[in-house]
Amino acid sequence: MHTKRLATALLILAAVATGCAEKTNTPTVESIAVAATEAKTGKITASTVASAQVEPNLSVYVTAKTSGRVVAIPKEMGDTVKKGDVLVQLEERDSANQLTQASANVAQAEAQRAEVERNLARLKTLFAAGAVSQQQVEQLETQLSLVTAQVTAARATADLARTQWEQTRIVAPADGVLAARLVEPGALVGSGTAVFQLVDLSTVIVKTGVAESDINSIKVGGTVPVVVPALDNKEFTGKVEAISPAMNPQTRSFQVRVALPNPDGMLKGGMFAQVRFAVKELEGVLIPVAAVVERNGETAVFTIEGDKAVQKTVKVTVTSGDTVAVDGLTPGTKVAVAGQNLLYDGAPVRIGGGTNP
């Protein structure tokens, strides 16, 4: 009898222990904090994004116009210059001597002409008094024509000598920044030798291609956003300057030229840029782009229904900045916009905050 009571007690203790164990091992699921917003009906602008490189508004190679030896380079790569600033000085002694001689020849020829003009004036006075013949006057008039021609020739020679002397100073053809120096002091350069590369970055250019289906939506004079990834995705505002009327047969696109003011010089030649062209305005169900997630290869959102998250597959039809238009949702539906990357279908949720890892 005692043995039976002991066995019964052990069975009761085992049952109690099992129940306690089952109660202790039941998992407690914490709700996930999320932020949510409602899907709304609205208008959104469809756009197309084109990639391109930033180019200087002006990029030229400054070249020598005469031959000579480099004696001075007063400017350096990276310097900002004005039109007419001397970039390179060539040896000028020979050309300066030639200019001096040519100027002297001009002065001599002009003095001879002045003397002939005075003589001719006196001779005409004498001719009027009958003291000299018509032939003598005509001879002096012929001499005046000859010395006048000599003056013209001397001036032309002096102008050429001055030009050659001026060309020993290689100057900036426009305002800009010196992007590269291509000569060294003491080097012998010839006519056409490049000495500097000059660029103008006060305004930069982006040339990109637009598909034929979108080109008629773009107008000259319109403004477009331009994003530069290298500058932390900074957005600039560009202006459409020109649109090619002919398609590029290789790319099947039309070239569009966009100009961007660059007063602080942040934009550099060669930087990668993305230009967004607005092509049409549509109406649809709009949600923040942050609400859209990828699940098992599908585009989805998590709707908030009570205290549960429900995964719903959607189709993004248009993206514009931080907003997307989607098919598969009705206006007024609450969707998670923060904390959604932690969710799964049926996950318990609570509204209040939410972060994404």
Image (cartoon, rainbow, N blue to C red):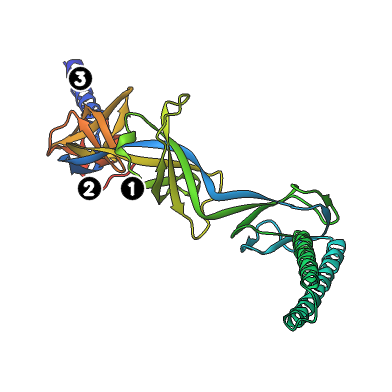
Q: Position of residue 218 (x, y in %)?
A: 33, 40
Q: What number is the disc on residue 11?
A: 3
Q: Position of residue 301 (x, y in %)?
A: 24, 32
> Which amino acid does the dot numbered 2 rest on?
Gly
In the rendered image, the vertical position of residue 205 relative to residue 89, given as above or below: above
Q: Earlier in the sequence, mark 1 or mark 3?
A: 3
Quadrant where the C terminus lies?
A: top left
Asked if residue 336 lies left or right of residue 331, the reply is right
Q: On the image, which quarter does residue 92 sit in?
A: bottom right
- Mark in front: 2 vs 1: 1
- Quick one: 54 or 130, which is closer to the camera? 130
Cα–Cα span, label 2 and label 1:
42 Å
Q: On the image, which quarter does residue 329 sit in?
A: top left
Asked if residue 34 lies left or right of residue 241, the reply is left
Tag 1 secondary structure: loop
Residue indicated by mark 2: 352
Cα–Cα span, label 1 and label 3:
87 Å
Cα–Cα span, label 3 and label 2:
49 Å
**Discs 2, 1 touching: Cβ within 8 Å:** no
Asked if residue 259 lies left or right of residue 353, the reply is right
In the rendered image, the vertical position of residue 201 relative to residue 98, given as above or below: above
Q: Is residue 357 visible?
A: no
In the rendered image, the vertical position of residue 156 relative to residue 208, given as above or below: below
- Mark in front: 1 vs 3: 1
Tag 2 secondary structure: loop
- Mark in front: 3 vs 2: 2
Residue indicated by mark 1: 222
Q: What number is the disc on residue 48?
A: none
**Discs 3, 2 touching: Cβ within 8 Å:** no
- Quick one: 324 or 187, which is closer to the camera? 187
Q: Is residue 270 visible?
A: yes
